[in-house]
């Protein structure tokens, strides 16, 4: 059986832990991973969502690895349809994905997995959400973030209180830039109180100042090209401390 290799890495202290291999039980269509913290049990968890093709239909098997127990465990199947293998986004003890009801349904919404209760919920979207427009979900400054792409702009919304529909507010509208960039990969990284936002456009950093409507591309010397940028929360917790 095919296996994957997964590491939990803390770049702050330069320590990592290789997780026990978990063979795939069946041929799979796609795999999505996620990592998050369960404050109820004081445990870090890795979620593996595997889409298997069974008799011309799709079924999602969900497995959770606990650093505290050092073991994989299967939980209830994922009840929605996931179109890409993009990693789930961790906010407030839950993992979030943009999903639809089934393969042939183009009505989009946000589904979450609570790491403590292992239950699935639907996350409310802002009133402006269009079910036929796939939301791009991110995390910005610890807050849940949704991006809506239109013909010539990108709207960035943040949920100031997770799970509360009324707490959605539009942070900024970003225009498309002259470069041929794919907005589906737009990833807000950092918001500056001075009126600017740092966005990763498919490996290209853009610093957009919305007060002056100006954009620059910061250079990272010594790095000629990169594919993905992630923001992490600094911690002194070792991934091996639970052993």
Image (tube, rainbow, N blue to C red):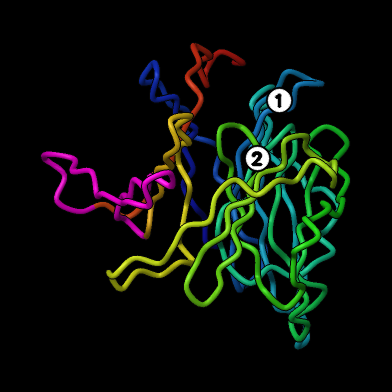
**Up-down: is 25 above or below 12?**
below
**Up-down: is 108 above or below 216?**
below
Residue 68 figure quarter: top right
Which quarter of the figure is the N terminus placed in? bottom right
**Left or right placement of residue 234 versus residue 14 in this view:** right
**Left or right placement of residue 94 versus residue 18 in this view:** right
**Left or right placement of residue 132 versus residue 193 in this view:** right
In depth, the one of 129 and 220 nearer the eye is 129
**Up-down: is 155 above or below 38?**
below
Circle 2 residues within 10 Å: few <14, some 14–19, many ≥20: many
The magenta segment is 202-225
Q: Position of residue 131 (x, y in %)?
A: 77, 73
Residue at 31% of width from left, 49% of height from top?
205
Residue at the left extreme of this rendering: 222
- Tell me the SS state at disc 2: strand
Q: Position of residue 196 (x, y in %)?
A: 42, 40
Residue at 59% of width from left, 45% of height from top?
171
Q: Which residue is mark 2?
A: 90
Main secondary structure along the magenta-highlighted residues: loop
In depth, the one of 176 and 204 nearer the eye is 176
Q: Position of residue 233 (x, y in %)?
A: 51, 25
In depth, the one of 51 and 154 nearer the eye is 154
Q: Position of residue 133 (x, y in %)?
A: 67, 74
Residue at 24% of width from left, 49% of height from top?
217
Q: Which residue is mark 1?
A: 69
- Tell me the SS state at disc 1: loop
**Count of marks, rendered view:** 2
Mark closest to the chain's N terminus, 1 or 2: 1
């Amino acid at each position: 059986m095919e296996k994957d290799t997964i590491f939990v890495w803390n770049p702050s202290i330069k320590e990592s832990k290789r997780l026990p291999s978990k063979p795939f039980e069946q041929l799979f269509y796609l795999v999505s991973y996620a990592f998050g913290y369960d404050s109820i049990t004081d445990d870090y968890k890795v979620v593996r969502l595997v889409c298997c093709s069974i008799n011309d239909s799709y079924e999602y098997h969900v497995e959770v690895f606990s650093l505290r127990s050092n073991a994989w465990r299967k939980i209830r199947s994922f009840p929605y349809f996931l179109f890409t293998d993009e990693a789930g986004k961790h906010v407030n003890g839950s993992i979030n994905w943009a999903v639809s009801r089934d393969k042939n349904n183009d009505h989009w919404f946000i589904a979450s997995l609570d790491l403590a209760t292992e239950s699935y919920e639907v996350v409310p979207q802002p009133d402006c959400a269009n079910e036929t427009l796939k939301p791009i979900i991110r995390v910005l400054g610890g807050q849940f973030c949704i991006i809506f792409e239109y013909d010539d702009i990108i709207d960035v919304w943040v949920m100031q209180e997770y799970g509360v529909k009324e707490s959605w507010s539009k942070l900024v509208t970003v225009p498309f830039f002259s470069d041929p960039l794919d907005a589906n990969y737009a990833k807000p990284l950092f918001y500056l109180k001075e009126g600017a936002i740092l966005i990763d456009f498919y490996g290209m950093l853009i610093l957009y100042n919305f007060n002056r409507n100006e954009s620059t591309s910061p250079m990272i010397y010594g790095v000629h090209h990169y594919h993905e940028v992630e923001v992490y929360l600094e911690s002194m917790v070792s991934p091996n401390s639970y052993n």
